[in-house]
Image (spheres, rainbow, N blue to C red):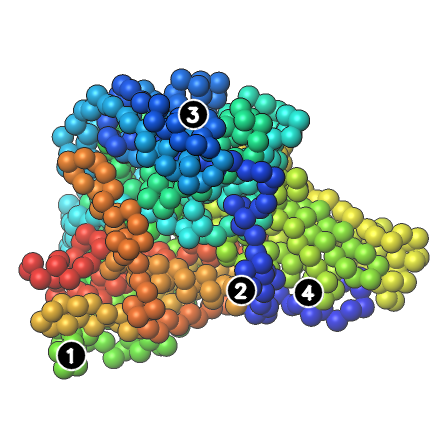
Amino acid sequence: MAVAAAHAPQANMGEPAPRVDARQKVTGEARYASDFPVANPAYAVLVTSAISKGRLVGLELEAAKAVPGVLDILTQDNTRELKELKFGAGGGGASTSIQNLGPEIAHDGQIIAMVVADSFEAAREAAHKIKASYAAETPSASFDSPGVTQEDITKVSERHKHMPQAGDAEAALASAEVTIDARYGTPTQHHNPIELFTTTCAWDDGHLTVYEPSQFVYGIKNKLAEKMGIEPEKVHAVSPLVGGAFGSKGQLTPRSGFVALAARRLNRPVKLVPTRAEGFTIATYRAETRHRVRLGARRDGKLVGYSHQGWEITSRPDPYGVAGVEESAHLYAFGAVATHVDIVHADRNTPGFMRSPPVVPYVYALESAMDELAVKLEMDPVELRRINDTAKDPVTGKPFSSRSLMKCYDAAAAAFGWSRRNAQPGAMREGEWLIGMGCATAVYPTHIGACTARVRLLSNGETRVQIAAHEIGNGAGTVIAQTAAERLGVPLSSVKVEVGDSSLPPAPVAGGSNTTASSCSAVLKACDAIIAKLSSGVAGQIMPGSLADQFKRLGVGAIEEYAEFIPPGVPADAVQKLYAGTPTLTGGHQGEKLMYAMGAEFVEVRVNASTREIRVPRMVGAFAAGRIMNTRTARSQLMGGMIWGISSALHEATDVDPRTARYVNDNLADYLIPVNADVDQVDVILVSEQDDFVNPAGVKGLGELANVGTAAAVANAVYNATGIRIRELPIRIDKLLEV
Ligand code: MOS
């Protein structure tokens, strides 16, 4: 690496550097949004709808107003000054168009009032004393409810105008030697970040500071300004650390406007810490999906056709959908491809992104169908993937920038001991435990967006990186620090990174796993500008001698450079748009080459022959995602992803009462997730892959890679253990008993 300084680099990329914020976090010093001290705060408590459809006809406020300490109650009558924002799936938009406190009720748990008081206790007591009366109608809860309406997503969603199609899939399927035609389903899921959906607002002379956990502080800044009818320059969004987000904190939710308004009316800071149950309905979630997958193949395993129809639940007004066929259609040499997605409107809150949103449900369905095809062909499922591996897009013919899928399969299969598998269901057994082995593909599009950064280097090597990227628990701040340390040739310990604040140069929404690629590319550019100055203005020309000497020669104590990184394929005004809160991400199948991170996951399950208890004693995943910036944080992301995969395979589902369209298990006691006892051995293999095409950092992004495919691998393993194919997630004991 060409560096100007004579320091030995102590933070080479790829090394397992511990997180720069690790100490802060384990000692409790770390400050999350609601931990920021504000002077003399008032406390807000929400009141939410008890019905899912109809009208709010009355609110009795007298008893609430009489509670000592109550300062204000926001209702539909005193909040009309809030501007209505357009729904915008994606970074920077409004999470839902359902933004008013009534009178129309569009879903259960819709906010209908907010009490503000001197103390949290008073606000809560008053909130409980508000009596709402409704004109209720019968809601439609989900797919099978009367009254839902269905729309072709290409007709109603700007994001999903074109579904992948290639050749004549119907003809190919009709004449195929072997076919699979199967239906799959995935349930509602909620992100359940440990940090709740808090908002604290403080005004000072017409300027608003908002402390809110966010995956996009420039989105909060711009959209909250719009909501309040003020200039974006007057809003400062602060979110240096986020305690879990997974897609749920990338957009502006209605609560922020209510808190900002309450603080303005009172001329006093207002803090809202909603309950976990409220989080199920005041933010977004992963909607339930249904799939019909058809595969056609020759006897030798070569695919000739793939047809995938998807159905996804959304709210009444908003055309939200993930349309994951846009990703799955590029995975193998399918031959002909036909895809179609319908969104189904029900009386529910608007869904949104949740970790690997498009790929998780759609690739679960596809990878289950691939396993079913392998069974029918009497072929090893790894070989089926090998036969249909491809260097180019089956839909457009474009090449992949790099593709290491089979390398991942081979590495994971060897480590797992796949050769010991008996393909005959129920053939492997240890005492009362039926043993099953299954595998599936993980895939995630490589995204990148325009990004800016400011770097300052002092003559003693102290470095400050300023970038409004987001530390959402993934180690973003750590790899950003490593990038600057390596490029400038200074020790990691002398680099300070400032993130998560809208007064810093903007970075894209922390979504689509673009953060490392975008942020590090911008930081590299700013570092290179510094190096160019140190090298007497000639970029890349290294001056001999120590850093201090070079500064002396230049006669300065510090060099600061601001850089704007604009990747190919995004519009020239992308930086302006970023400042305005509308980031443009590109990548995946959108560029001249297909850019995807890939992996292979192998799972062993044990199913009790009589009780049907399901255990996962071990998992092996091998992943290729371009350059790995930090093996420790990368491993941690991939391991966490696979564990989340166990969760969606065996545990996770938000139950929706079909009569009332209400969430039943809106708490962490009843919303099942794996605990340590459910996760035994998880091995992560990092398969080396060099890709100079994707971006200057060579990074593909892997935060959302490993939880794709796991659910199918578990389901395929359960089939291998029992001969029972469960096509509706999660796979729970009762489903294995019904057969
Ligand atoms: Mo992620 S669901 O793209 O925040």
- The secondary structure type at the circle numbered 2 is helix
Q: Earlier in the sequence, mark 4 or mark 1?
A: 1
Q: Residue at x 52, y 41 (%)?
A: 212
Decide: marks 2, 1 in contact (CB < 8 A)? no
Kind of residue at disc 3: Leu
Which residue is tagged 2? 26
- Residue annotated with mark 1: 429
Position in image of residue 34 (x %, y %): 52, 45
Whether residues under marks 2 and 4 lie with C-beta atoms below 8 angstroms apart, the answer is no
The C terminus: image quadrant: bottom left
| CA gap, disc 2 and disc 1 | 43 Å
Q: How packed is label 4: few (under 14 Cα within 10 Å), some, or many (20 or more)?
A: many
Q: Earlier in the sequence, mark 3 or mark 4?
A: 3
Q: Residue at x 28, y 53 (%)?
A: 671
Question: Which of pointers 2 and 1 lies earlier in the amino acid sequence?
Answer: 2
**Residue 386 seen:** no
Tell me if I can see residue 550 in this picture. Answer: yes
Density class for disc 1 (Cα within 10 Å; few <14, some 14-19, many ≥20) is: some
Q: In the image, which is nearer the foreground, mark 4 or mark 1? A: 4
| Front-lying residue, 561 or 292 | 561
Depth check, front residue: 603 or 98: 98
Amino acid beneath label 1: Arg
Check disc 3 and report the residue beneath it. Answer: 74
Mark toward the viewer: 3 or 2: 3
Please state the horizontal and vertical placement of residue 209, each as a whole percent of the image: 60, 35
Q: Which label's residue is closer to the chain start, 1 or 3?
A: 3
232 versus 674 height, above or below: above
Instruction: Give the labeled residue for mark 4.
Output: 492
